[in-house]
Image (cartoon, grey):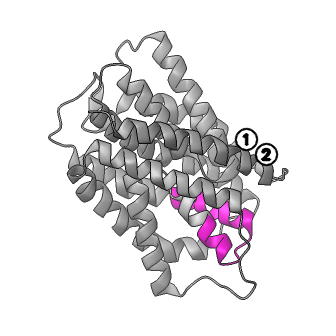
Amino acid sequence: MMDLGWLLVVELIALGTVTGFLAGLLGIGGGMMMVPFMTWILASRGVDPGQAVKMAIATSMASILFTSLSSVRAHHARGAVRWDLLRSLAPGIVGGGLLAGAGLFAVLKGQGLALFFALFIGFSATQMLLDRKPKPSRQMPGPAGQTLVGGAIGLVSGLVGAGGAFVSVPFMTWCNVPIRQAVGTSAALGFPIALANTVGYLIAGRSVPPALPGAVGYLYLPALVIVAAASVSMAPIGARVAHGTDVARLKRLFACLLFGLAAYMAWQSQRS
């Protein structure tokens, strides 16, 4: 691999370490953290701001292919993955992910995606802080309803470069799935989300000239390799900590951080 420079390597290792740990700990936040910081890393190296956003989203999503496998093994070992829900949600997720990655992603401008990202993680952070409790009688919808929900998760995930847990964890807990099962199942859902969207990004970016050495369309391969390696090593540690820790306070702190990242991406969306 080409000479990246020691500072870039250090930045990418640090980013992968933090996002991998958070993905395992909270079942949420990997992409939310990665996209703003990856956008900054790429823009600081001369990539056009709009292109930097798209590359950050695509590279973040591709890294989830590896992070989700590492995280789900740890959650499955503790019986926290609802495979029945995974089977019901996955078809819609694949369809929504392909629509986002191969269709809408190529049409929308990078600045528009940055604004959408900012609004959505701001909304997600607000929901974290409110921590509303579900009605005791509420249950997951039937197979058709779960397919539709999966489609929405895959579509939104593809537009923001995250693994979908920011939608699936709140939805499942809202339907009275225990929080640890919601987190574990969301980790498993990350793989079909990432696979469908990454295929879509490759299709959409097949004619995009490389913005940096090592870029293939919207994917920045050096960052993908380094971030994925660091994330995979940290996700199981985060998952182990999650099963022995009250994460409510951590989620509140993380929500505050998300508001700051939302503000940065909103600012990024205004750049030419």
Helix or strand or loop: what does disc 1 sit on?
helix
Where, quadrant-wise, is the N terminus in this rendering?
top left
Mark identifier at residue 17:
none
Q: Label 1 sits on what residue type?
A: Ile
Q: Residue tagged by mark 1?
A: 237
Q: Is residue 185 magenta?
A: yes
Would you place residue 144 above or below residue 109 in this image?
below
Instruction: Please count the marks in the image.
Output: 2
In front here: 109 or 72? Answer: 109
Callout 2 amino acid: Val
Q: Which residue is mark 2?
A: 241
Looking at the picture, how far across and down is residue 98, in whole percent? 31, 61
Q: Residues within 10 Å of mark 2 (few under 14, many from 20)?
A: some
Front-most of residues 135 and 155: 135
Residue 149 visible, this angle: yes
Where in the figure is residue 154, as x and y percent of width and height? 42, 63
Up/down of 37 relative to 98, above or below = above
Residue 15: quadrant of the picture: top right
For image coordinates 78% across by 54% down, the residue present is 248
User: At x 52% / y 21%, what residue is drawn?
Assistant: 11
Magenta residues, as a range?
A: 170-190
Q: For this view, does 90 lie left or right of residue 58? A: right
Q: Is residue 249 magenta?
A: no
Within 10 Å of disc 1 (Cα), the crowding (few <14, some 14-19, many 20+) is: some
Identity of the residue drawn at 62% across and 66% down: 170
Q: Nearer the viewer, residue 17 or 45?
A: 45
Examine the rendered structure and indicate whether residue 123 appears above or below residue 145: above
Disc 2 is placed on an element classified as helix
| Residue 203 visible | no
Locate residue 253, reporting x and y percent: 72, 44
Q: Which residue is outermost to the left?
A: 207
Question: Is there a contact, CB below 8 Å, between mark 2 and mark 1?
Answer: yes
